[in-house]
Image: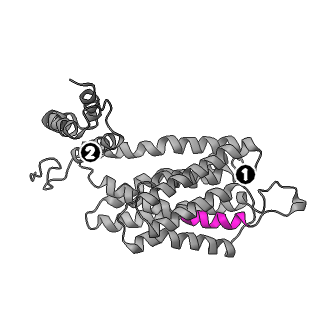
Amino acid sequence: MSTLERRYRHLLRAYPTDYRHDRGDEIVGTYLDLADPRRRWPSPADAADLVRGGLRQRLRAAGATDLIPGVRLAALLALTTAAFLSGFWALVEQSPPPTEAGVPVFGPFTSTGVVAWLAWLTATFLALVAPGRPTRVAITVGLLATVAVLSISPIAGLPRPPLLVLVPQVALGLLALAVDSHLPLPARALPTVAATGGYVFGHAYYWDAYRWSAEQLLPATGAVLLGVALLLAVGLAMRRDWRGGWAVVALLTPVGLLSVHILAGAVDGLGGAPRPTYPTLVGAALTVGLLGPAVLPAAVALRRRIGSSPGEPCPTCGARR
């Protein structure tokens, strides 16, 4: 066995065991026939293709074929939410505190957050006019800009938006990377409409600085996002389409991070504290960040245990049960 074949077979572990036994030789043989014989490592495209194929087969075996469409639906909702917040925060950046307040600013803007919000607004526009790879690249740039603002600004001594604002934006952006490349025009227009709405909403209901706005706006945004996802889930379930349910599960982490101020307040409120303390906020965010992503694989495992309903086709062979 060559080194290249051995490495392809390592990647083949992404597939279920039974599927590997039945078709593993055929799959590896196809990749070897198409690969340059001088190669020692699978190409990144081949590796990604094998992992994607393995994931699809595992989902079929678990009876969770609606998961990927559900995550794509969640990605559209996440991008739309991130666009709305970017539009709102872009307005906040244009209203820095007065000089006599002695609060540090970033040139004519409130903070370095303006860099991240402009990157997100660019991604929003590209989602409308250039779906697919250009949009995903722009979302990645928005994510990197947000992380850079979060991590580099304190080192450089520059003002930045609070973690309460930046961390949910990262979670929304990571999910938005899964947005479908073939959405119809009305769906592609949703993020642009949301960004415009966020900017207009900011003009009508601007609550002073980042912190006060965040404490009011983020939990409300999380509640609306969860409410929309639940309505979609119920509507689709009435047609025996379970994409909406998977979308709700995928959105739990960003919704939890948007609502972390409320969650932390509930914890501190049990001890009589009027406002959540910083350690409680951090603890609540870490809890959501650790438990939220675990819900999706747990839901897939539960779906596999429950199995298909009587009369549904087998997800592997298509035979009626």
Q: Residues within 10 Å of mark 1 (few under 14, many from 20)?
A: few
Furthest-right residue in view?
A: 100
Q: Nearer the viewer, residue 182 or 86?
A: 182
Which disc is residue 53 wearing? 2
Q: Colour scheme of this structure image?
A: one colour
Give the extent of the magenta segment.
83-94
Residue 101 % position (x, y): 87, 59
Residue 76 % position (x, y): 43, 62
Q: Is residue 162 above or below residue 196?
A: above
The quadrant holding residue 2 is top left
At 68% across and 68% down in the image, what residue appears? Answer: 91
Q: CA distance from mark 1 to mark 2?
A: 51 Å
Furthest-top residue in view?
A: 1
Magenta span dominant secondary structure: helix
Which disc is residue 12 wearing? none
Q: Amino acid at mark 1?
A: Pro
Residue 55 % position (x, y): 29, 44
Q: Is residue 18 left or right of residue 162?
A: left
Q: Is residue 319 magenta?
A: no
**Label 1's element?**
loop
Q: Which residue is mark 1?
A: 274
At 37% across and 61% down in the image, what residue appears? Answer: 181
Give the number of callouts.
Answer: 2
Q: Is residue 123 above or below residue 317?
A: below
Residue 202 % position (x, y): 66, 71
The mark nearer the N terminus, 1 or 2, is 2
The quadrant holding residue 313 is bottom left
